[in-house]
Image (tube, rainbow, N blue to C red):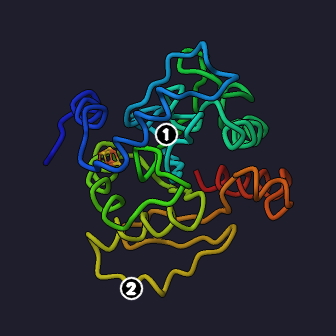
Amino acid sequence: MTYKSFAQLNDAIVHCTKCPRLVAFRTRIAKEKRKQYRDWEYWGRPVTGYGSPDARLLIVGLAPAAHGGNRTGRVFTGDKSAEFLMRCLYAVGLASQPTSTRRDDGLVLNRGYMTPVLRCVPPGDKPTARELANCRPYFQSELQLLSDIKVILALGGIAFKSCLKYFQSIFPITLKDYPFQHNVHYRMPDGKRLVGSYHPSPRNVNTKRLTYEMMVDMLETVKGIL
Ligand code: SF4
């Protein structure tokens, strides 16, 4: 399906029920809530992308967190990964503020757009191949609407592979020619840069697999390309 506008695409996304397991999970989490957020009305639906339609940078994550995006209704908003990522984006001038806490917090990305490859929170952060495939057309439609993108920054191996699958749907590329690692850069057949990064998850940050300095260094390089 071709969407003529973000409004049309996002309307289709938030009403999507293609994955029964994820629909049940996102609804249950939204009902049960985490104690510290018991006063929140959880979003409990698929999340859309967020940012500027004339973005040059597309930041791609895996999926909304159970008590992050699934609670706040915005990608990379209201969890530890968002906290770390936004601090780094702000440090290099790619975000207007160092925090991302709720949909109406005023965050502006500097010619940037953030989106997940899977719109609904998966149990244990582990989507099935079918669920990723179900959701992929939304990502493809987003990229069709974001016509100024120069760099795609994929956070984590699953997001990176999903981006490669997007390119593979258009060009005859072989996935194994693009191994994933942190701060890896590839020029794709249409001239876009695909950059791989470790995911800014608490696990990666707490174990120092991904440090603030590593992320900021990489974002400085990305900014230079933009
Ligand atoms: S993960 Fe994507 S395809 Fe599956 S129900 Fe959510 S929005 Fe729909």
The alpha-carbon separation of the residues under discs 1 and 2 comes to: 27 Å
Disc 1 crowd, CA 10 A, few/some/many (<14, 14-19, 20+) = many
Q: Quadrant of the rendered structure where residue 37 is? A: top right
- Mark 1 and mark 2 lie on one chain; the one further toward the N terminus is 1
Tell which of 222 and 169 is nearer to you.
169
- Relative to 156, 202 lies left or right: right
Q: Is residue 124 above or below residue 160?
A: above
For the residues labelled 1 and 2, say whether their Cβ atoms are less than 8 Å apart.
no
Residue drawn at (70%, 52%) of the image = 200
Image position, residue 4 (x, y; %): 18, 36
Residue drawn at (50%, 56%) of the image = 152
Residue drawn at (38%, 73%) of the image = 189
Q: Is residue 34 above or below residue 224?
A: above
SS assignment at label 1: strand
- Relative to 66, 172 lies left or right: left
Residue type at tag 2: Thr
Q: Is residue 154 above or below residue 165?
A: above
Image position, residue 149 (x, y; %): 43, 50
Tell which of 80 and 164 is nearer to you.
80
Disc 2 crowd, CA 10 A, few/some/many (<14, 14-19, 20+) = few
- Relative to 25, 4 lies left or right: left
Residue drawn at (58%, 38%) of the image = 76
The residue pinned by badge 1 equals 113
Tell which of 67 and 162 is nearer to you.
67
Residue type at tag 1: Tyr
Image position, residue 8 (x, y; %): 21, 31
Image position, residue 195 (x, y; %): 58, 64
Tell which of 94 and 35 is nearer to you.
35
The residue pinned by badge 2 equals 174
